[in-house]
């Protein structure tokens, strides 16, 4: 059985000449980039390349990372555009009422009176709270804020979310 892998970031560029890469993070867990952690570099259908993080810092809203044995820009330049991933067994246990993006994306969304609205296709993290992008069968996408007043029930097993839409939310 093939192990599932999950995106934690995308290498968008190199930084300097000593093998550092600039990563756009796709994870809420900063510890994923701690020194000594293992990540996998994945490009297209290519086999994942196992890498060990040797250093990490944050600079201008990007994670700057360098890997063991890759201490030169020439060794990492071809990493641009690749994703950094982890295996399913590297996922962190979450608390109650906490979910991974991959658990939420694909869930069907219903109003509290069981009217189907659409399917969650993306999650945005603009600031104070996440925003779930719901693709409707017809019409434009809806933006649903992940706040207690709106999101009432999240059933990951059934892939269903029930909301209490505030005024104007479904317009």
Image (cartoon, rainbow, N blue to C red):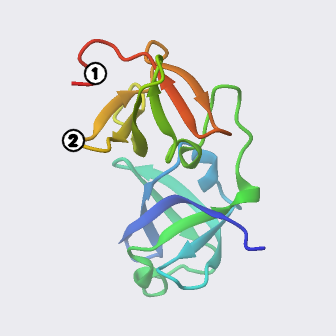
Image quadrant holding the N terminus, namely bottom right
* First in sequence: mark 2 vs mark 1: 2
Which is closer to the viewer, label 2 or label 1? 2
Helix, strand or loop under label 1: loop
The residue beneath circle 2 is: 139
On residue 39, the disc is none
The residue beneath circle 1 is: 169
| Residue 84 placement (x, y as % from top left) | 54, 66
Q: Is residue 140 left or right of residue 82?
A: left
Q: In this view, does 105 lie to the left or right of 142?
A: right
Q: Is residue 149 above or below residue 36?
A: above
Q: Which of 162 and 82 is in front in this view?
A: 162
Q: Residue at x 64, y 38 (%)?
A: 158
| Residue 124 placement (x, y as % from top left) | 37, 41
Contact (Cβ within 8 Å) of mark 2 with mark 1: no
Q: Nearer the viewer, residue 8 or 148?
A: 148
Q: How far apart are marks 2 and 1 (CA)?
A: 14 Å
> In the figure, residue 82 lies in which quadrant?
bottom left
Image quadrant holding the C terminus, namely top left
Q: Residue at x 45, y 79 (%)?
A: 79
Whether residue 150 is visible, yes or no, is yes
Q: Is residue 125 above or below residue 128?
A: below
Q: Which residue is drawn at 21% across and 41% down?
A: 139
Q: Is residue 34 left or right of residue 149?
A: right
Helix, strand or loop under label 2: loop
Q: How many labels does the image show?
A: 2
| Residue 44 placement (x, y as % from top left) | 47, 80
């Amino acid at each position: 059985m093939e192990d599932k892998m999950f995106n934690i970031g995308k290498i968008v560029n190199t930084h300097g000449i000593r093998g550092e890469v600039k990563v756009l993070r796709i994870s809420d867990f900063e510890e994923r980039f701690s020194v000594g952690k293992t990540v996998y570099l994945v490009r297209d259908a290519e086999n994942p390349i196992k890498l060990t993080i040797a250093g990490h810092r944050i600079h201008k809203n990007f994670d700057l990372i360098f890997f063991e044995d890759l201490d030169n820009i020439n060794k990492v330049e071809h990493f641009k555009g690749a994703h950094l991933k982890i295996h399913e067994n590297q996922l962190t246990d979450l608390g109650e009422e906490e979910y991974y993006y991959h658990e939420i994306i694909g869930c069907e969304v219903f109003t509290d009176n069981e009217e189907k609205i659409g399917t969650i296709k993306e999650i945005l993290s603009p600031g104070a709270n996440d925003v779930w992008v719901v693709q409707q069968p017809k019409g434009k996408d809806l933006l649903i804020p992940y706040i207690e007043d709106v999101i009432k029930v999240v059933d990951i097993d059934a892939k269903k979310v029930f909301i209490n839409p505030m005024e104007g939310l479904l317009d």
